[in-house]
Structure formats: structure tokens, C-alpha cells
């Protein structure tokens, strides 16, 4: 996805306004905190299930125990993997906050052309000799700032694409129920 946006199709002012609008890095704080809480809860669940399996092994044996504890172990592994995935999403939200903060800091302020001074024959005479040089200096500064703005946005786009591309879908919760065995009827039908 990186490189899909033609940043040079925007003015420097439009890019400056776009990157500096909205909540910025603070928009990632609440989602990152929520993913941290989810990750912690899943880690606790995984730990509780694993501990429960260990405790149950001490007092419960046989085929039914192995089947039940094997299913619970699958849930514990899923919770462990989901915990790691949720921690990855939290880290991704925090990284995105860093990317927007860096883009805002690196985005140059657009260079404005100075307002024309008072006219009059003396002002016009001075402008005739100095105006061309001043205009070239201003245009060079504007071009350099705009080029840097395009680079900042391309870097931001690349970082965002890499960040979102590193996320993976959560695995489905395993189904751990077993089919109920068919028991022949005692009634003789």
C-alpha cells in the first residue's frame, strides 16, 4: 500500500494543515491502554488455565481427564497467543502515535511570500533592482520546504503501511467440546 498517495498533488499548505489537524498522537492513547488491558486479561486467563491444568492432573486421571485437560490446554495456548497478539496491537498503536508525532515535528512550515511594501516611485525603483533576487530566494525556500513536506508525508505513509501490515488477525477460539458417546439403551427397545 505504501506509495499509493501522490503527495506532490497537494500543496505544501494542504499537507501542513492535514498532518497538524486532528488529535495526533493522543488519539492512540486510549486504544493502546485498552489493548494493554486486553493483553493483561488474556495473559491472566492463560496463566489461570495452565495452573488449573497442573492442579487437576494431581487429582484427576484417565481418558476423560486427558480429553478435558487437553481441550483446556488448547484454550490456554489460544489465550497465550491472543495475549501476545493484543500486546502487538498495543505496540502498533503506540508506534503510530510516534509516527504522527515525528511527522508533525519534521513537517516544515510553509514559506510565505512577503507582502508587497508601499509603492511610490522610490519603492518601485528599489523593487526593480532587488525584486528579482528576493523572489528567487523566496521561491527556492518554498521549493525546498515543499520538497521536505513531500518527503515527510512519504515517510509517514511508509511507516504507517509497515505498521498496519505487521498486524495479524486473531485466531478463532478453539472448539474444545467432544462428541457425546452413544450409550446403548438399557431398556431393550
Image (tube, grey):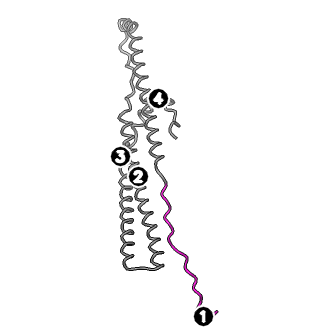
Q: Position of residue 122 (x, y in %)?
A: 35, 6
Going by the image, does 74 lie left or right of 187?
left
Give the class, few, some or many, for how many residues have Cα within 10 Å of label 1's Cα (few <14, many ≥20): few
Q: Which of the marked residues, 4 or 2, is nearer the chain's N terminus?
A: 4
Contact? badges 2 and 1 (CB < 8 Å): no
| Residue at image mark 1 | 187
| Residue at image mark 3 | 26
Contact? badges 1 and 3 (CB < 8 Å): no
Q: Residue furthest bottom?
A: 187
Residue 11's disc is 4
The Cα–Cα distance between marks 2 and 3, rounded to whole angstroms, is: 19 Å
Position of 33 relative to 123 (above/below): below
The Cα–Cα distance between marks 2 and 1, rounded to whole angstroms, is: 58 Å
Give the class, few, some or many, for how many residues have Cα within 10 Å of label 2's Cα (few <14, many ≥20): some
Residue 88's disc is 2
Q: Position of residue 127 (x, y in %)?
A: 38, 9
The Cα–Cα distance between marks 4 and 1, rounded to whole angstroms, is: 86 Å
Q: Looking at the image, is mark 4 or mark 1 nearer the viewer?
A: 1
Q: At x 51% / y 73%, what residue is drawn? A: 177
Question: Which SS does the magenta portion mostly show?
Answer: loop
Segment colored magenta: 169-189
Q: At x 39% / y 21%, what residue is drawn? A: 141
Amino acid at each position: 500500500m505504501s506509495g499509493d498517495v501522490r503527495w506532490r498533488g497537494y500543496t505544501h499548505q494542504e499537507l501542513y494543515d492535514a498532518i497538524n489537524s486532528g488529535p495526533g498522537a493522543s488519539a492512540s492513547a486510549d486504544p493502546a491502554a485498552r489493548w494493554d488491558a486486553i493483553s493483561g486479561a488474556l495473559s491472566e486467563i492463560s496463566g489461570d488455565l495452565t495452573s488449573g491444568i497442573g492442579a487437576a492432573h494431581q487429582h484427576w486421571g484417565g481418558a476423560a481427564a486427558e480429553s478435558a485437560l487437553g481441550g483446556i490446554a488448547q484454550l490456554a495456548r489460544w489465550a497465550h497467543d491472543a495475549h501476545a497478539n493484543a500486546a502487538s496491537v498495543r505496540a502498533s498503536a503506540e508506534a503510530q502515535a510516534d509516527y504522527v508525532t515525528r511527522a508533525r515535528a519534521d513537517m516544515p512550515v510553509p514559506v510565505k511570500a512577503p507582502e508587497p511594501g508601499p509603492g511610490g516611485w522610490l519603492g518601485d525603483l528599489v523593487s526593480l533592482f532587488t525584486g528579482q533576487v528576493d523572489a528567487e530566494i523566496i521561491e527556492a525556500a518554498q521549493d525546498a520546504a515543499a520538497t521536505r513536506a513531500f518527503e515527510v508525508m512519504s515517510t509517514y505513509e511508509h511507516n504507517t503501511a509497515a505498521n498496519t501490515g505487521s498486524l495479524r488477525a486473531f485466531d478463532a477460539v478453539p472448539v474444545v467440546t467432544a462428541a457425546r458417546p452413544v450409550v446403548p439403551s438399557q431398556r431393550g427397545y
